[in-house]
Amino acid sequence: MKCAKIIFLTLVILFLLTANVQATADILEEQKNLFNISDFIKEANEYSKESFPEINMSDVLNSAIKGEINGDFWYKVVFKALGKETTNAIRSLGLVIAIIVIHSILNSISEGLENKSISQVVYYAQYVLIVTLIMKNFTEMIALTKNTIENLVGFMNCLTPILISLMITTGSITTANVIQPVILFLISFIGNTIIAMVLPFILVSTVLGVVSNLSDKIQIDKLSQYFKSGVTWILGVVLTLFVGFVSIEGTLSSSVDGITAKTAKAAVSNFIPIVGKILGDAVDAVLGCATVLKNAVGVVGVLVVIGICILPIIKLAILTIAYHLATAICEIIADKKIAKLLEQMANSFKILLAVLFSVSTMLIIGVTLTLKISNSRVNVQIGGKNDKKHWKLGKQYCNSSNYSYNFRDDFTRREKQKIHKNCIGNIFAFLNSFSSNKGCSWG
Amino acid sequence: MEIDLLFKIAGIGIIVAVLHQILSKAGREDQAMMVTLAGVVIVLTVVIKEISSLFSAVRTVFNL
Amino acid sequence: MEIIKIIALGLVATIFIMMLKQYRPEYAIYVSLLAGAGIVLLVMDKLAGIINILSSLSNKANINSGFLGILLKITGIAFLTEFATSICKDSGEIAIANKIELGGKVIIIGMSIPIITALLELIIKILP
C-alpha cells in the first residue's frame, strides 16, 4: 500500500516537473495574452513606423525574450537619415549664402555713392529674404520637436501600465505602487511643461534675436540671451528631479519587495506539504517568465523611444552644425549683423536639440531604472544565504509563540496537521509583522 | 567717339572765347554777347543729346 | 583697354575744364557733364553683364525676383541722383544739390516700402 502510494506520488511529481519545464513557452504566451501585449505591440508599431518602417515590433519582442538583441537595423536607418538631412541642410544653406553673395555685390556697386539710404534698403531686402528662409526651417523644427515630445509622452503613457502590471506580477508590488503614479505624473508634467513653457521661451528668444539684428541702433540681445539661459536652467532642474525621484523611490521600495517576495515564497514552499516545493518551483517559473517578458517589453519600449526621437535628433544636430558653418562662411563676405543673426539661430537650434535629447535620455533612464529596480530582487533561491536569515527570524517568531518545531525536519503526520492548523494563521501575521518592521504595508 | 565730342565742345568753347574777346575789343559788345549765346545753345544741344542717351542706358540697365 | 580709355577721358576733360573756367565758366559744366556721361556709357555694357548674372543667380536660387528688381531700380535712382548732385556741388550750387539729394532719397524710400512691409509682416507672423 505504502509502496504504491510512493510510486504514485513519484509519478505525479515527475509529471509535474516535466510539465513545468515544457510549459515555459506556454506560460509566456498566456502571460502575453493576459497583459494585452498584442495591443501594446500595435501601439509600438504605430509609434515607430516612421523611423523603422520595416521592423515589426513583435519580432523584436520575441527575439528579446530569447535574449538576442539585433542591432543591425540601426545603422541602416541612421545612415539613411544622415544622408537625407545633410543634403536638405546644405540646400537651404546654399540658398542663404547665395542671397548674401548677391547682396554683397549690390552693396559694392552702390558703395561709392554717398547716399547711405540705399545701402540700408539693400540690407533690409537681404534681411527679409534670409529671415524668411530661416524662419521656415525654424518653425518646422519647433513643430517637429513638439510632435516628438507628444509622441514620447503618449508612448510612455501606454508603456508604463504594461510595465507596472508586469512588475506587479514579478513581485515588486510596493515598488510598482510607489512608482506608478510618480512616473506617470512626472512624465506628463515634464512633457506639458516643455511644450507649454520651454518651447515658447525658445521661440520668443529667437524672435528677439531676429528683431535686434535689424539695425545697429536697436539692440535687445541681452533679453534673448536671458531667455535662453532660463531655458537651459529649467531643463537641468527638470532632468535632475526626474532621475532623482525615480532612483530614490525605486531604491527605497525595492528592498522591501525583495524581502516580502522571498518570504512569501519561502512560506509557500515550506508550509504546504508535498506540493509545496513544486508550487514554489512553479511560482519560480511563472515569475521567471514574467521577468523575461517584462525585460523584453522594456527593451522594446526603449527601442521605440529611441526610434521616435532619433530622426528629429539627427535632423536638429545636422542643422545646428550647418548653421554654425554658415556663420563662419558669412562672417567673411557679409555684414557682421547677418553673421550674428546666423549665430543666434544656430544657438536656438542647439537648445532645441538639448531639449529633445534630454527628454529622450530621461525617458530611457526612467525605463531602464524601473527595469533594473524590479530585477534586483527576482533571483530567489531556496537555501540561499538570506533565506537562512528568514528561517531564523521565522523560528524566533514561532518560538515566541510557543510553537517549537524545526522547518527543515521531516514532517510527521501529526506535526503536519499542527502546522496546517496553527501556522497558516500565523503566516500572515508573521509576514505582516515583518513588513511592518520595514515601515510599509501590503497595500 | 567720346574724346572727339569732348574735343569738339572744348574747341567750340575756345573759339567762342576768342571771338568774344575779338568782338569786345572791336567794340561790338552785342555781337560778342550773341556769339556767346549761340555757342552755349550749340553746346547745350550736343550735351543734352549725350545726357539723354546716358539716361536711357541707365534706365535699360537698371530696369527703371 | 577700357581703363585707359576712361582715364584718358577723365584727365582730358579735367584739363579742358581748368582751361575754360577762366574764360567761359559755363562751358566747364558742359564739359564735365559730357565727361561723366561718356565714362558711364563706356562701362555700361559691363554693368549690364553683372546685373544679368545677378538676376540669373537669383532666379536659380528661387528668390522672389520682385525684390531684386526693386533693389536694382533703387541702385539706379541713387546713381543718377549722385550724378546730378555732384555736378551741382562742383558748380557751387550746394542748395540745389541738397534738394536733388532729398528728392532722390524720398523716391528711394517710396520704392522700398514693399520690402519694409514684408519685413514687418514676417516678424509679426513668427511672433507667437
Image: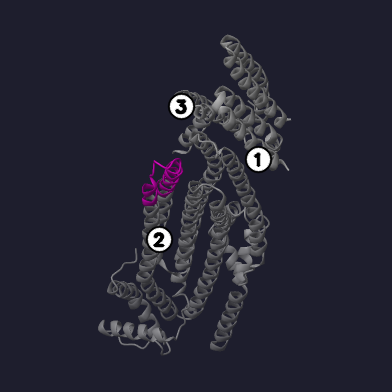
Q: Mark 3 points at which residue?
A: C94
Task: Give the residue type at disc 2.
Answer: Leu
Q: Which residues fall within the magenta stretch?
A: A197-226
- Label 1 to label 2: alpha-carbon separation: 71 Å
Dot 1 crowding, Cα within 10 Å, few <14, some 14–19, many 20+: few
- Label 2 to label 3: alpha-carbon separation: 69 Å
Task: Give the residue type at disc 3.
Answer: Ile
Task: Give the residue type at disc 1.
Answer: Ile
As helix, strand or loop, the secondary structure at mark 3 comes to helix
Mark nearer the viewer, 2 or 3:
3
Q: Which mark is residue A239?
A: 2
B50 shown above or below A140: above
Are the residues flagged by discs 2 and 3 from a single subunit? no
Farthest residue to the bottom: give it. A409
Give coordinates of residue C58: x percent, y percent: 66, 39
Give coordinates of residue A229: x percent, y percent: 38, 55
Mark nearer the viewer, 1 or 2:
1
A439 shown above or below B12: below
Q: Name the residue under label 1.
A: C7
> Is label 1 in contact with label 2 (beta carbons under 8 Å)?
no
Mark 2 falls within which chain?
A
Instruction: Name which residue lies at 47% across and 82% down.
Output: A381
Give coordinates of residue A359: x percent, y percent: 46, 57
Q: Quadrant of residue A393?
A: bottom left
Left or right, A204 with respect to A74, comes to: left
